[in-house]
Image (tube, grey):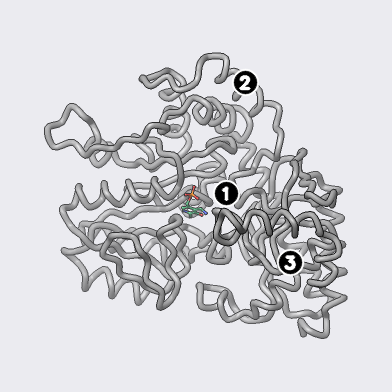
Amino acid sequence: ARARYVDRCPKSYQAFQEALSVMPGGNTRTVLFHEPYPFRAATGEGSWLIDADGNRLLNLLGEYTAGLFGHDHPEIQLAIRTALQGGINLGAHHSIESKFAQLLVSRFPALEKVRFTNSGTEATLMALTAARAHTGRDKILVFEGGYHGGVFLFKPDISTNAPFSWEVCPFNDVKAAVTAIRSLGPELAAVMVEPMLGSGGCVPARPDFLAALRRESDAAGCLLIFDEVMTSRLGEEGGQGLYGIFPDLMTVGKWIGGGMSFGAFGGRAEVMDLFDPRRPDAIAHAGTFNNNVLTMHAGVAALGRIYTAKHAFRFNAWGDKIRERLNQTAIDLEIPFQISGLGSLMCLHPGAGPIENYRDVMRRDDRLRELVFLDLLEEGYYIARRGFIALSLTLTQQEIDRFVDAFRRVLERRSDLLR
Ligand code: PMP
């Protein structure tokens, strides 16, 4: 599979060699690297990517969930043009910012007040800062496989460089979480969790796990934070609405900025009011581009006009059907292979057995993941190297039908290795 990739992508190889001389690894996003070398995207149209060698790929990665609207959604483009006409870098309060904030607050029940950042990473940093200031406590409990930004990746036995005092528990393990929260008790500022591990392999939280986190956080007097950077797209009210469990603070990012750089955090007014600069004890939260007009306009189009709550419901129901079809394909072929996830987000896992936490994800054979990735690229489908898929609104039923066929061909071709 690698040899055929090299044959198809000579220009990407050249481009990679040139990039290597100025960027370690030839790029600035670790996640985009794959063997033998990453393909070079030339342009994007609708749901399609064209690479430097002219290969056309159906984009099922959807920019790790931020590309929900495809590459050239007319309403997003119009919103950005409108923003440009009104002037860039206003450096002042402006009304599209408050309109965007109102849309967010009316969409997600946990949000009473909100502040903008430029990325999901910054949003989690600021939510944790708020929780520590509000509680006057230090420690943060997180879960294995949780990804909360470039500096917060929690793999078993790997520490992070983020300057917080972390405790890490296995995901979906009620007993371990309850024990940890009770024993850390008065030191604990926050429990931070994704309602579904996103980057960690699309592992949905068990409802009793989230319910236990809610109950025990209340009892311990710490804040529960949902990182909904990915899961906010999963239903009418994001992951919290799906589970009917509501955090004290939440973070969002990705698609909500319409594909522009974006992040936001917010929640209970009592906590968020710590950021009111009129207070003598206010927490400072600066950021030159926090209210940049391009993101604010694109976000208003994204959240208010295109991906409305109703649309989110229908779209994720479609995603559930697609996931079921892929799983059924593997069952029909009697090949141990699973597709985990919720709604429009899913992840391919070779092998058998339950997938309830990050250890289950890591147990699967990574070489087989790579092989399936390269085979799907050859078939003309772009997913993440680690099997992640984020559907976008521009995909058609016919494109998905063809993808399911291609998935079947790959399983058949590799059935000896996969069994
Ligand atoms: N939290 C979660 C759950 C994420 O998936 C991501 C990005 N993959 C982030 C935070 C960080 O967002 P960003 O890449 O915008 O910094």
Which quadrant of the figure contains the N terminus? bottom right
Q: Residue at x 51, y 73 (%)?
A: 358
Q: Residues within 10 Å of mark 2 (few under 14, many from 20)?
A: some
Instruction: Examine the image and state in which quarter residue 349 appears.
Output: bottom right
Between marks 1 and 3 in the image, the one whose residue lies nearer the viewer: 3
Q: Which element type, helix, strand or loop, lies under badge 3?
A: helix
Q: Residues within 10 Å of mark 3 (few under 14, many from 20)?
A: many
Q: Is mark 1 within 8 Å of ligand 1?
A: no
Q: Is residue 20 above or below residue 50?
A: below
Q: Which element type, helix, strand or loop, lies under badge 2?
A: helix
Q: Amino acid at mark 1?
A: Leu
The residue indicated by pointer 3 is 373
Instruction: Examine the image and state in which quarter residue 66 appears.
Output: top right
Q: Residue at x 43, y 25 (%)?
A: 97
In depth, the one of 152 and 311 nearer the eye is 152
> In the rendered structure, which disc, 1 or 3, sits on the residue that comes first in sequence?
1
Q: Is residue 383 above or below residue 295?
A: below
> In the rendered structure, which disc, 1 or 2, sits on the residue that comes first in sequence?
2
Q: Is residue 156 left or right of residue 56?
A: left
| In the image, farthest residue toward the left | 280
Q: Amino acid at mark 3?
A: Phe
Disc 1 to disc 2, C-alpha distance: 28 Å
Marker disc for residue 97: none
The residue indicated by pointer 2 is 81
Q: How far from the left and from the top, in percent, is residue 240?
A: 46, 50
In depth, the one of 217 and 293 nearer the eye is 293
The residue indicated by pointer 1 is 234
Q: Amino acid at mark 2?
A: Arg
